Image (cartoon, helix red, strand yellow):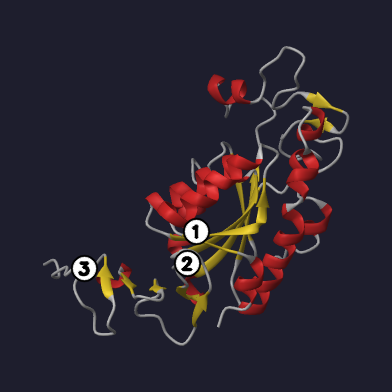
Amino acid sequence: MWRERDIYGQADDGGVRLGGGVAQWRLHADHVDVATGAGERRACIEAELLPVVVDLDATALVLLDLQNDFCSPGGWTDRSGLDHTACRAAIPGAVRAVEAARQLGVPVIWVYWYNRPDLRNLGAPTLWSFKHRLDQAGIGEQLDHGPVLTEGSWGATLVDELRELVRPEDVQVEKYRMNGFHATHLDQVLRAQGIRTLLFGGVNTDQCVSTTVEDAYFRDYATVLLTDATATSSPAYCKDAVVFNSQQCWGFTSDTARFAAAA
């Protein structure tokens, strides 16, 4: 029998209920509590539009596509005539995010874009997204360091600054589209481990990061975009739009300093 769902009703802590059961949030005048029913590992992260109280035992850090093809000289972004140094701006923040996660006992999930060498996992719309000219190298085509974003290639490898931070207990997810949830085991791993809150960083903010954040929101995860741990080679207004939607629609925005200071 379904329990009564007094959505928008007054909760015993003075907040207003959003949702029902163990998955409910509680909205207060000065914060949002997404950790209803949590034990001793509750922590408040300063954020926009309001500070958010999370359960650290149900929280994970997700970092997307911080790979050579996007972030390194000679990689795909660079060779496509885009500004790979703009993507590199996410790396120091990603390092800080990992350090904060280790300090707070929050698991780290690395999401990579790998593709089959025969490209059978990709349809024409995705191939077109990244090959607009005959002379432009598309996914799987050869550059100086090997095939673009292909499993086992230099371009698909995590950048040096972050590769040394990976631990054996970290979860690594291979994805095949921009969205980290599409056709991967990411959702299954998160639900099996009881994760309900996700902090995000990586590249590109307006492509792989935004589609994954939005899908996480569709799946009822609490999402926090760490704005200084994400970057894009697109024009600045593209990231601005993602930041706006992350705090107005999909969840919250914060930064690595405030994540590290969670208490």
Residue drawn at 76 percent across, 32 percent down = 82
- Where is mark 2, residue-wise? 193
Residue drawn at 33 percent across, 72 percent down = 27
Q: Nearer the viewer, residue 46 or 68?
A: 46
Q: Amino acid at mark 1?
A: Val
Distance Cα–Cα, label 2 vs label 1: 6 Å
Could you tell whether 250 is left or right of 237 in the image? Answer: left
Label 3 SS: loop
Residue drawn at 35 percent across, 77 percent down = 36
Could you tell whether 192 is left or right of 108 in the image? Answer: left
- Residue 230, x across and y down, in percent: 65, 52
- Residue 155, x across and y down, in percent: 78, 39
Q: Amino acid at mark 2?
A: Gln
Could you tell whether 134 is left or right of 54 in the image? Answer: right
- Where is mark 3, residue-wise? 8
- Where is mark 1, residue-wise? 189
Q: Residue furthest bottom?
A: 40
Residue drawn at 83 percent across, 54 percent down = 160
- Residue 188, x across and y down, in percent: 45, 55
Front disc: 1 or 3: 3
Distance Cα–Cα, label 1 vs label 3: 31 Å
